Image: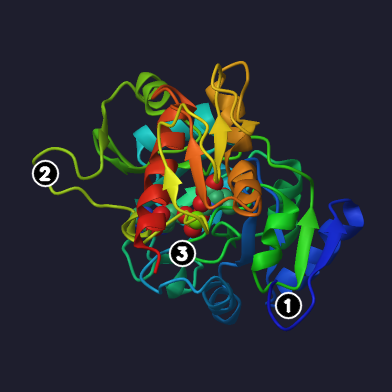
Amino acid sequence: MGGTRPQRRIAADDRGIAEVVRQLKAGGIAAVPTETVYGLAADAANPAAVARVFRAKGRPAANPLIVHVANREMAARYAEIPPLADRLMARFWPGPLTLVLPRRADAPLTGAVTAGLPTVALRAPDHPVMQAVIRGLGRGVAAPSANVSGRLSPTRPEHVAELAVPLVLDAGPCRLGLESSVVKVEEDRLVLLRPGSLDSATLAEAAGVPVELAGAGAKEAPEAPGTAFRHYAPRLPLDLDVTEAAAGRFLLGFGPVPGDLNLSPAGDVAEAAANLFAALYRAETSGAERIGVAPIPAEGAGIAIRDRLQRAAAASRDRP
Ligand code: TXA
Ligand code: MG
């Protein structure tokens, strides 16, 4: 459980939001809800506050943070916005799309947020509470997922308990349950740095340009630094594409594979995405020795689910 200081969970009503805004203005940190996962928020212009975020997560300094903005207008303070990015903002913001854009030289950001890169990652979240926090602060909110670096992302306030943060703004479970898609915008193409809630087929269709996978193709592709680190590690070994029950293995089902807990009995990938991290937290504490996950189709949110599970399986294999 958390750090040495106790953690307080407060309701995300006007009073709770005002308290979090006061904390952020004073250089403090707080866990806040978004439509994807809970974030660990700090004033993106405050070096001490941003340092607290890196420390609380145990996050490598080379891994930059997403700056959360209210809208396009606020985004324009931080980045140059080419026409392609403009179109994506108009179509998908607020929502689970993070755009990596050229950072403005005069952007009011402390350097640690972007880990010294010439780019900045921006997202306008589609959650009324997070929107109220950003508007209350009046500027960009730096917020990585509110998990200890390398662990499962928190989609419920109780999962934030692992993190040493004094305040959690409780708005219940997150609607989407998977992190945003992170996309680097170049002049005439998009590079998907992290698959996420918004699937790349929808993105490509709206953008009218191809979406390339980072690392794919001959061109050297810029990766999201975060994807290089060990990630989404459950506390137990994890097996993919499991269809059979076995002693000592907690099975996360999908569709016709019932499992001990079914991510989506109807076989709906969006529902499975919303349940995924909470189900993994539950499997970890079930007393089982391993976790199995039923096959998830690689379509829509299923692509990002499979990405997270593959990383989780790899991370669980590396465990000492
Ligand atoms: O849904 C989300 O995106 C959640 C909620 C809280 O908004 N946030 C989140 O943040 O997932 P985090 O820090 O866990 O993941 C951000 C990812 C990392 O892989 C990081 O390396 C990448 O975005 N990133 C941030 N700034 C970048 C930049 N300038 N260039 C490339 N990648 C960047
Ligand atoms: Mg994260």
Q: Would you say residue 76 is visible in this rendering?
A: no
Residue in view at x 62 percent, y 56 percent:
39
Coordinates of residue 256 in the picture (x, y in percent): 55, 16
Disc 2 vs disc 3: Cβ atoms closer than 8 Å? Answer: no
Q: Earlier in the sequence, mark 3 or mark 1?
A: 1
Question: Disc 2 vs disc 3: which is toward the camera?
Answer: 2
Q: Is 269 in front, or is 211?
A: 269
Q: Is 292 in front, or is 298?
A: 292
Residue in view at x 35 percent, y 52 percent:
314
Please give the residue where the numbered disc 2 appears in the rendered image.
Answer: 219
Residue in view at x 42 percent, y 64 percent:
64
Q: Amino acid at mark 2?
A: Lys
Label ID, residue 26: 1
Q: What is the spatial separation of the Cα atoms under label 2 and label 1, in whole angstroms? A: 44 Å
Please give the residue where the numbered disc 3 appears in the rendered image.
Answer: 107
Q: Is residue 129 left or right of residue 293?
A: right
Q: What is the spatial separation of the Cα atoms under label 2 and label 3, in whole angstroms? A: 29 Å
Residue in view at x 75 percent, y 73 percent:
166
Q: Amino acid at mark 3?
A: Ala
Residue 161 in which image quadrant: bottom right
